[in-house]
Image: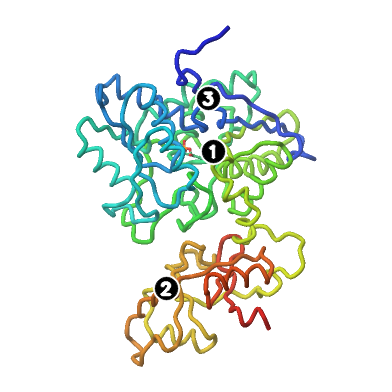
Amino acid sequence: MTVHDSVLDLVGGTPLVRLRRLTAGMSATVLVKIEALNPGGSVKDRAALAMVRAAEESGALGPGGTIVEGTSGNTAAGLAQAAAVLGYRSIAVLPDTIAPEKVDVLRAYGAEIVRTPARLPREHPEHVNNLAARIAAQTPGGWLANQYDNPANPEAHRRTTGPEIWKDTGGAVTHFVAGIGTGGTISGAAAHLKEVSGGAVTVVGADPLTSVYHGGDGSPFLVEAAGHYRHPDTVTDVWPRSYDPSVVDRILAIPDRESVLTVRRLAREEGLLVGGSAGLAVAAALRVARELGPGNTVVALLPDSGRAYLSKYHSVDWLRRNGFLDDDRPGLLAERIGPEPVATVTPQATTGEARAVLAAQAVLPVVLAGRDPALPASAAEIVGWLVPEDLGSADSAALPAVPHGRAPFTVGTGETVDEALDRAEQAGAELLFVLRDGRLAGVTTPAALRA
Ligand SMILES: Cc1ncc(COP(=O)(O)O)c(C=O)c1O
């Protein structure tokens, strides 16, 4: 009989599983490391426990102390789990885009929750990292875990994740693929794998298409917890110190569509219920494996379980409403949206610029500054819409604020016209922003759809 002293003894030691169906036609072996089998449900158990232990050793965290972290959820779960076992209070500062299921998990562990808007400029006092730092400083016995810059984060992966992969593959691993959030996972695991293989293991970062880590434009993407978003008003973009780009040989840019459809296939074809960043990593691993011959072993790390995302990537409705899944049904909205891009303006436009756009179309979608001109605005960047009467008469005036009630209502190319009309009616929406791949593909009205 094996008895563990606490649940914290079960952190790490996760298994590798071979992909069987997604790799059809490929010569290389693709193995996935199932981090959802950590007791707190994600790879973040490793960094959380290591950071707490290091803080106890240094004296930064003492008896009766409070653990504070700004996080997208999983690190907070790992910290709250450790806090419950070790007798600390824990406070999680969360951006408001986090899946509700994740917030409920933190509450269940007894963590206190502070919400703050997502996508603020890095300098903003309410930015998740700044708010967490302030709360830690103002709380007696408060300690900020700060996974972004805490060396115990990558060190946890250098000591555990990397060695586990080397040992479990019997040294056969040739490629390691992981997403980059704080960078702790890839930097630490890669450092070990490079060292033990004499540099032979190739390390591949999997990055959302618009993440800045590979040089993307920094605009929003949908895969949670991986990649690096840059707010347009951020002055100095700071990368986490937990990320060491020097150990990464290659970064692949993966569109959200490829990530979310890979998540869906992992569940349906491999029996692996995982989160969005796992789809991102596997999508990149499959791209790598396709180029390789026999004798190569690609290991992809799958950070967490799909249970936290049942209402997102694993929901057929969500996939259709964001334009990721255009399944074979009659009357899809996709058929009613042309390929030509919609003309838009940013909130910084003048009324003259707005009028020029309105010469060709009846309404004026307002979106946050598009960065890569080749990419349409993402759903999160759609502000609302104006009509000619909003503009007044002066041509050089600043664009008026989008009136109350003109908030964007979005539908997806994967919905049928009837489904979109039903939802629009319930919401009282006059204008529908149509999304394809989570980005603006067109605008239409209920009247035009009924015609
Ligand atoms: C679900 C998920 N995927 C990926 C990552 C990125 O891992 P890392 O921060 O070690 O780079 C995280 C980190 O929070 C995560 O929670």
Question: Which disc number belongs to residue 162?
Answer: 3
Q: Which circle, 1 or 3, is nearer the viewer? A: 3
Question: Which disc number belongs to residue 346?
Answer: 2
Task: Give the left or right position of residue 228, taking residue 19 as reference.
Answer: left
Q: Amino acid at mark 1?
A: Asp
Q: Estimate the x, y position of residue 53 in percent, counting from the top left.
A: 35, 22
Q: Estimate the x, y position of residue 428 in percent, counting from the top left.
A: 52, 74
Q: Estimate the x, y position of residue 192 in percent, counting from the top left.
A: 50, 24
Q: Amino acid at mark 3?
A: Gly
Rounded to the nearest angstrom, the CA distance separating label 2 from label 1 is 37 Å
Above/below status of 49 relative to 248 = above
Above/below status of 125 relative to 1 = below
Q: Secondary structure at mark 3?
A: helix
Question: Which disc number belongs to residue 249?
Answer: 1
Residue at the image point whose x is 55% and y is 43% from the top: 277
Rounded to the nearest angstrom, the CA distance separating label 2 from label 3 is 46 Å
Rounded to the nearest angstrom, the CA distance separating label 1 from label 3 is 16 Å
Outermost residue, right direction?
A: 25
Q: Amino acid at mark 2?
A: Thr
N-term-proximal mark, 2 vs 1: 1
The mark total stands at 3
